Amino acid sequence: MGACNIFEVSSQLLFSQVLLGLINGAFYAMLSLGLAVIFGMLNVINFTHGAQYMMGAFAAWLMLTELDIPFWAALVLSPVVVGLFGILIERLLLKRIYHLDHLYGFLLTFGLALMIEGLFQWRWGSSGAPYPSPIPGGTNLGFMFLPTYRGFVVAAALVICLATWFAIERTRLGAYLRAATENPTLVRAFGINVPRLITLTYGLGVGLAAMAGVLAAPIQQVSALMGTNLVLVVFAVVVIGGMGSIMGSIVTGFGLGIVEGFTKVCYPPASNTVIFVVMALVLLIKPAGLFGQTK
Amino acid sequence: MADTLLKVEGLQAWYGESHILHGVGFEIGRGELVTLLGRNGAGKTTTLRSIMGIVERRRGSVTFDGRETIGLPSDVIARQGIAYCPEERGIFSSLNVEENMLLPPQVKPGGMSLTEIYQLFPNLLERRRSQGTKLSGGEQQMLAIGRILRTGANLLLLDEPTEGLAPVIVQRIGEVIRTLKSRGFTILLVEQNFHFAATVADRHYVMEDGRVADMMSAADVAGNIGKLQAYLGV
């Protein structure tokens, strides 16, 4: 990467890659946010997250093609449907393993992801289906052509992330969540139904993943495996940001998207690995992650 | 007793495989202030945690206001009107003082208002934007007591509120506990510090090896100092 000389790169290429990085970062942020919220409350690393993101995109696509439900309605409906599916999983399966080692949570959620992705692949194949952009057109920024929809995705992701942050850090329900993350037994002894709070948290985290999936549908092909590769990067983002840190996930998500964009300009072969290199470095220097607290 | 608020009978409790309580029995009248005394490991904290429903493996009977609670989960028990102040205080580090204060939800009408609680603990008002765990030990204790006064619960379970605190703070907490009693709260106090307990309580139960070994009223204490000292090993 030492080969990179920022002055030799055309500003056109640089800006466009950074902007593309920002768009990727928007998805990293939304997905790692949901993972962080779920991990904080359930102590489960939700490996089903990528599959739930895919389900969000699929739900929107099915709503459009089967029921004529437009994108904007699907942006709300799909997360609700997939979130309810998440609640079902929590009630039926996850709640049975909270007292066990992390490994069981990993095996269960990873197995679920494989099953869900397998089922979608079996039913709809793996080639993927296109989803028409709800906001066609774009703007010529001089250094690149920006499709309006992609600009919208970055803005929407920012709003979603900040709204989630606000809900957790500044509201009564958020105070329950933070307190229950620290000491669920005592919060329950104050009269708060903690098991229900846990179910709700999982539903919300899954709903966030599904909403990211809906936003991704018009950019990517809607396919059964669209979440598989993405979720690997997102796990790295969560580790870099610090497990369970809300602001950490948001900042790290967007930041790493931009880092990735830069790498594409400077040294393209490293662009797929740069996030994992950053992860290794952060773990060496600050094992709890950039925004994490050592317990 | 004319008007029993809490009645515990044959209470047994386990932590994992260890059998901690072997049939605890006592009762508290409405508006009374009763202590559980005893050495370390006698089962005082476990008794409180069993009444609160935090210890899951428990048997026997705990009736609060005439209703059996032994099979209920702790959030449902709390909603009947029992509030718990744990020995380790349980102040949340991710919440500021006021958020800690507002955390326990109201379970019944008639709790103290936030203004009244801040009048009782003026330090907390000054520091209401500080992180909960940045407070001194005494302030954390006051916060832990203060936050359960808002909820409308009429039975307070206080686990060693004076532990590790300076004498002047202990005195202050004693005043607060007397104020709470005069306001009609029923209080079950676990204490190692007998001298403190003697200044506030109406009656004392002495626990030994997971059972109640003795009971004496405040008036009987003076004549039974020797016996008490033997129980408490002081």
Image: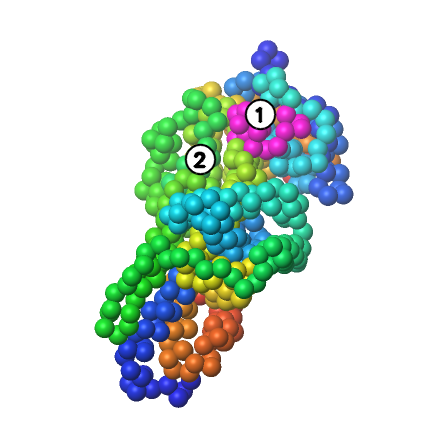
User: What amino acid type should be assigned to the residue bearing mark 1?
Assistant: Val
Q: Which residue is mark 2?
A: B147
Q: Residues within 10 Å of mark 1 (few under 14, many from 20)?
A: many
Farthest residue, direction top:
B2
Q: Residue at x 72, y 30 (%)?
A: B59
Number of marks in picture: 2
Q: Nearer the viewer, mark 2 or mark 1?
A: 2
Give the CA distance from mark 2 to mark 1.
Answer: 21 Å
**Whole-percent x and y of residue A225?**
55, 62
Query: In the figure, is residue B22 to the left or right of B67?
Result: right
Query: In the figure, is residue B6 to the left or right of A20?
Result: right
Q: Residue at x 47, y 20 (%)?
A: B184
Q: Residue at x 62, y 47 (%)?
A: A94
Q: Which residue is mark 1?
A: B34
> Is residue B71 found inside the magenta-colored segment of the image?
yes
Above or below, comparing residue A98 to residue A260 in the picture: above
Residue A245 appears in the rendering: no
Above or below, comparing residue B86 to residue A236 in the picture: above
Magenta residue span: B69-93
User: What amino acid type should be assigned to the residue bearing mark 2?
Assistant: Arg
SS for callout 2: loop
Image quadrant for the N terminus of chain B?
A: top right
